[in-house]
Image (cartoon, grey):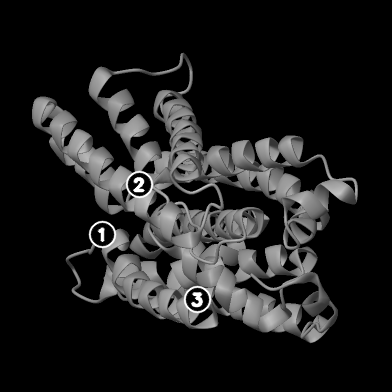
Amino acid sequence: MRNPRQLKRERFTPLTYMLLTIALLFTMILCVCVGSVRISFTDTVTAVWNGIWGLPIPETIAKNIILNVRLPRVLCVTLAGASLSICGAAMQGLLRNPLADGSTMGVSSGAALGAIIAVATGFTLPGFSMGGSMILAMIFAFVSLILILSLAYALDRSLSTGSIILIGVVFTMFISAIISLVITFASDHTRTLSFWTMGSFSGVNYPQVRVMAIALLLCGGVLIRFSPELNAFAIGEENARHIGVSVKKVKLIILITVSVLIGVCVSIAGTVSFVGLIMPHIARMLVGPNHRRLLPASLFSGAIFLLLADLTARTLLRPVELPIGVVTSIVGAVAFVIIFFRTRKVR
């Protein structure tokens, strides 16, 4: 991570946010218009515009596909991409580790295990069908994060990049084995459970969009609120403590917030890897390392990336739909290697 002196050298201008906003809106419109079923741009815009303002819409196949299938999916993908990206940026800042991310540290796998156990055991909350999987996903994500950091600290008190990634990879493999075991014994839910291991936004609805929006609004707001503290962590925990940062309190709040947000994403879309690893680095190139600007920029970049990944998953082999986790993992694996070697060269 860069030191605080580099925070002065900002590459941020208001034009950057304007361009990110335009790029996000354009990508969202593109994803609503394009799909396995061809629908004209005019019909798409008419259906969305009339739907927003409550105007009458002719009962056509275009209306059903756009308003009931594509629009909620695009909104959910946008919110999930923004959530995963801001979580990655916060974790990288907190741990001063450029490879920190929910997928590389095993947090997403832990959340997926929680969601799978909820489905396999039939655990639900009264009046909230997806509440059981969401609650267990949050709990397992937080426990996984604490366990991984504790093991890494026991192995290497400096919490170096190599130690954390090593523990994260081993933990992910262990969790994958448990997930396979659960799926084997829960044969009645095999197809449902498999989606959590590969990631998919197929079949999302507006209630899930509302849950995702509320989670991002609350958790994202908390992370942005602590952006000055994340800047302080860039100079080390001891120095941050000397300038008045309550290190333990801030770390606990951020870790809980990240776990909640990742848990919500996993409970709705399954394991979507590497978004939180790649996009904060892209955002850092655009606006610099100051978390006051980095976290909002990560929201935009993560949303755009996941929208394009979902569009690729839907259309590359249409009418067959690829799991979105496959697309993000292919891109993320290449980016992971590049970032890792760049980090090693810097050291």
Q: CA distance from mark 1 to mark 2?
A: 10 Å
Residue 104 can be seen in this image: no
**In the rendered image, the vertical position of residue 64 relative to residue 336, given as above or below:** above
**Residue 127, position in %: x, y?**
48, 17
**Residue 284, position in %: x, y?**
65, 76
Of circles 2 and 3, the one toward us is 3
154, 63: nearer the viewer: 154
Q: Which mark is residue 247?
A: none
Q: CA distance from mark 3 to mark 1?
A: 30 Å
Residue 126 can be seen in this image: yes
The type of residue carrying mark 1 is Pro
**Secondary structure state at the residue bearing disc 2:** loop
The N terminus lies in quadrant: bottom right
The quadrant in which residue 328 appears is bottom left
**Whether label 1 touches label 2, CB < 8 Å:** yes
Q: Which mark is residue 343?
A: 3
The quadrant in which residue 249 appears is top right
The type of residue carrying mark 2 is Gly
Lateral position of residue 130 relative to residue 314, left or right: right
Q: Which mark is residue 270?
A: 2
**In the rendered image, the vertical position of residue 212 relative to residue 272, given as above or below:** above
259, 165: nearer the viewer: 165
**Secondary structure state at the residue bearing disc 3:** helix
Q: Residue furthest right?
A: 243
**Whether label 3 touches label 1, CB < 8 Å:** no
Q: Residue at x 27, y 74 (%)?
A: 315
Of the image marks 1 and 2, the number of the one nearer the N terminus: 2
Q: CA distance from mark 2 to mark 3?
A: 29 Å
For disc 1, the marked residue is 323
Of the image marks 2 and 3, the number of the one nearer the N terminus: 2
